[in-house]
Image (cartoon, rainbow, N blue to C red):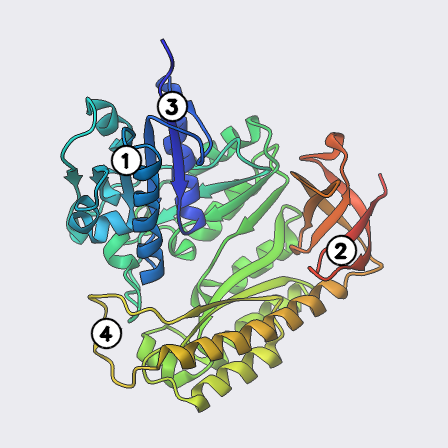
């Protein structure tokens, strides 16, 4: 008898990626064969995102594509879109199961209870009932593992649906997460990306602190690198900065959301810092780690954003000189306070502002990578093979390419960094 096949389609953030990997392990332990996303499967699982209208549309299009390709496959949808609009998803032809985030851990059981195609079954819940923590880490897919340490968010920013989709901030105990890190190490992965919805808010459930978690993870044998995926500027304390600077395992790599360089717009967004406070936190990182990779999130076209507000944002970022910008045109999400704000910015204007920041990003990232030419650094090589070359990243997240050598995959090598190409990749010469 042929084993049943399952594939996974993950939309959105690193948190979703870690959860999909955990769900896949449960199916594999249950006797399923995991196949590629484009392969024919008996069950198709979509872990959805709803951060923008584009994300919702992408999920709907994917459902229709999967159903056209294989009408007999069971299609199960979970994640944030499934939490926020379960009936909308259930009405799409081909969908058999919709589970909100509180039921994500039940997905395997719910799917295997289905005898075949039929009317959509919906398991969702109200926001205040989002209390369960679905433990998750990725494994077996790549050199880096994503470890989910926190879920939910209490911040309720004016543009964001995450509080409604994920619920209040909550977490597992430090000891349990350290044990998951040991499982990752036992599987042979060398790097862990610490992820969550509001990662630095860790400890709401257990009374522990984020720095307690970092110290416990630092002591796990077998893991050689950690990265903090994203942390709010008001939660990036001097204690955390000092710890990361002193630890040989925690990389000099910070992803910090700004959203706007205008204090007026930050106020409308209900963010918890000012432009000056953000600049002070970046300066604190650079005092201890001068060559740190700093990635920054920015939203353009928020209601009420004038050309002067955008100019303040542009000039602030140009002066700050981060290594990378993640740029998002504002997307109105039903049910958020931003919907009622006056001064809607036309999509055409928002797109123009995004393109101006994209051009700035290309220049800043090129400058950051070029500064390393002629230096020596440690690179963790991954299995990606393109044009006879393998690729890896330095601790400060510069991408390096070198002639493919399977013996070097998932190893950290000392590499002499040479010239930079048009993609900002650095040519590497392995020294050891």
> Which residue of the protein is positioned furthest toward the front in this rendering?
68
User: Callout 4 environment at 10 Å: few (<14), some (14 to 19), or many (20+)?
Assistant: some
Tag 1 secondary structure: strand
**How far across and down, in percent of the image, does residue 66 sit?**
34, 39
Q: In this orientation, which residue lies closer to the viewer: 417 or 270? A: 417
Estimate the spatial distance between the alpha carbons at disc 1 and disc 3, rounded to whole Å: 12 Å
**Residue at screen point 38% across, 78% down:** 266
Please identify, in this view, whether the residue under mark 2 or under mark 1 is nearer the observer: 1
Q: Is residue 217 visible?
A: yes
Residue bearing the label numbered 2: 426
Tag 2 secondary structure: strand
Question: With 329 as the anchor, is 244 left or right in this view?
Answer: right
**How far across and down, in percent of the image, does residue 10 sit?**
40, 43
- Badge 4 vs badge 1, beta-carbon distance below 8 Å: no
User: Callout 2 environment at 10 Å: few (<14), some (14 to 19), or many (20+)?
Assistant: many
Q: In this orientation, which residue lies closer to the viewer: 77 or 195? A: 77
User: Callout 3 environment at 10 Å: few (<14), some (14 to 19), or many (20+)?
Assistant: many
Estimate the spatial distance between the alpha carbons at disc 2 and disc 1, rounded to whole Å: 42 Å
Q: Which of pointers 2 and 1 lies earlier in the amino acid sequence?
A: 1
**Residue at screen point 34% across, 33% down:** 44
Q: Quadrant of residue 2?
A: top left
Estimate the spatial distance between the alpha carbons at disc 2 and disc 3, rounded to whole Å: 40 Å
- Badge 2 vs badge 4, beta-carbon distance below 8 Å: no
Q: Which of pointers 4 and 1 lies earlier in the amino acid sequence?
A: 1
Residue bearing the label numbered 4: 339
Q: Which of pointers 2 and 4 lies earlier in the amino acid sequence?
A: 4
Estimate the spatial distance between the alpha carbons at disc 3 and disc 4, rounded to whole Å: 42 Å
Q: Which of pointers 1 and 3 lies earlier in the amino acid sequence?
A: 3
**How far across and down, in percent of the image, does residue 286 sit?**
64, 68
User: Callout 1 environment at 10 Å: few (<14), some (14 to 19), or many (20+)?
Assistant: many
Numbered mark located on residue 75 in the image: 1
Residue bearing the label numbered 3: 5
């Amino acid at each position: 008898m042929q084993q049943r096949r399952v594939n996974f389609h993950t939309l959105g953030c690193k948190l979703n990626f870690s959860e999909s990997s955990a769900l896949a392990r449960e199916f594999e332990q249950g006797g399923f064969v995991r196949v590629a996303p484009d392969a024919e499967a008996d069950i198709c699982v979509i872990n959805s995102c709803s951060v923008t209208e584009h994300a919702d549309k992408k999920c709907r299009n994917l459902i229709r594509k999967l159903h056209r390709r294989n009408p007999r496959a069971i299609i199960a949808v979970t994640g944030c879109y499934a939490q926020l609009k379960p009936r909308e998803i259930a009405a799409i032809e081909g969908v058999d199961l919709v589970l909100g985030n509180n039921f994500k851990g039940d997905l395997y059981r719910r799917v295997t209870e289905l005898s075949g195609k039929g009317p959509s079954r919906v398991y969702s819940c109200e926001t205040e009932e989002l209390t369960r923590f679905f433990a998750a880490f990725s494994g077996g897919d790549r050199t880096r593992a994503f470890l989910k340490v926190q879920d939910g968010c209490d911040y309720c920013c004016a543009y964001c649906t995450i509080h409604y989709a994920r619920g209040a901030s909550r977490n597992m105990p430090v000891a349990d997460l350290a044990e998951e890190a040991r499982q990752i190490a036992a599987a042979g992965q060398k790097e862990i990306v610490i992820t969550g919805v509001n990662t630095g808010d860790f400890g709401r459930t257990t009374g522990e602190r984020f720095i307690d978690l970092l110290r416990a993870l630092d002591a796990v044998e077998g893991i050689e690198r950690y990265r903090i995926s994203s942390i709010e500027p008001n939660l990036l304390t001097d204690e955390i900065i000092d710890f990361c600077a002193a630890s040989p395992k925690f990389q000099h790599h910070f992803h910090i959301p700004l959203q706007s360089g205008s204090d007026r717009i930050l106020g409308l967004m209900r963010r918890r810092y000012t432009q000056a406070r953000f600049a002070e936190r970046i300066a604190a990182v650079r005092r201890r780690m001068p060559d740190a990779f700093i990635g920054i999130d920015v939203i353009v076209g928020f209601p009420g954003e004038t050309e002067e507000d955008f100019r303040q944002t542009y000039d602030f970022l140009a002066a700050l000189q981060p290594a990378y910008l993640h740029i998002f045109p504002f997307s109105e999400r039903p049910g958020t306070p931003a919907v009622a704000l006056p001064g809607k910015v036309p999509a055409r204007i928002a797109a123009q502002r995004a393109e101006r920041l994209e051009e700035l990003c290309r220049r800043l990232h090129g400058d950051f990578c070029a500064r390393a030419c002629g230096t020596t650094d440690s690179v963790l090589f991954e299995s990606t093979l393109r044009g006879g070359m393998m690729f890896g990243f330095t601790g400060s997240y510069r991408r390096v390419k070198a002639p493919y050598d399977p013996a070097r995959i998932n190893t950290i090598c000392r590499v002499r960094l040479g010239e930079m190409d048009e993609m900002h990749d650095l040519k590497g010469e392995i020294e050891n």
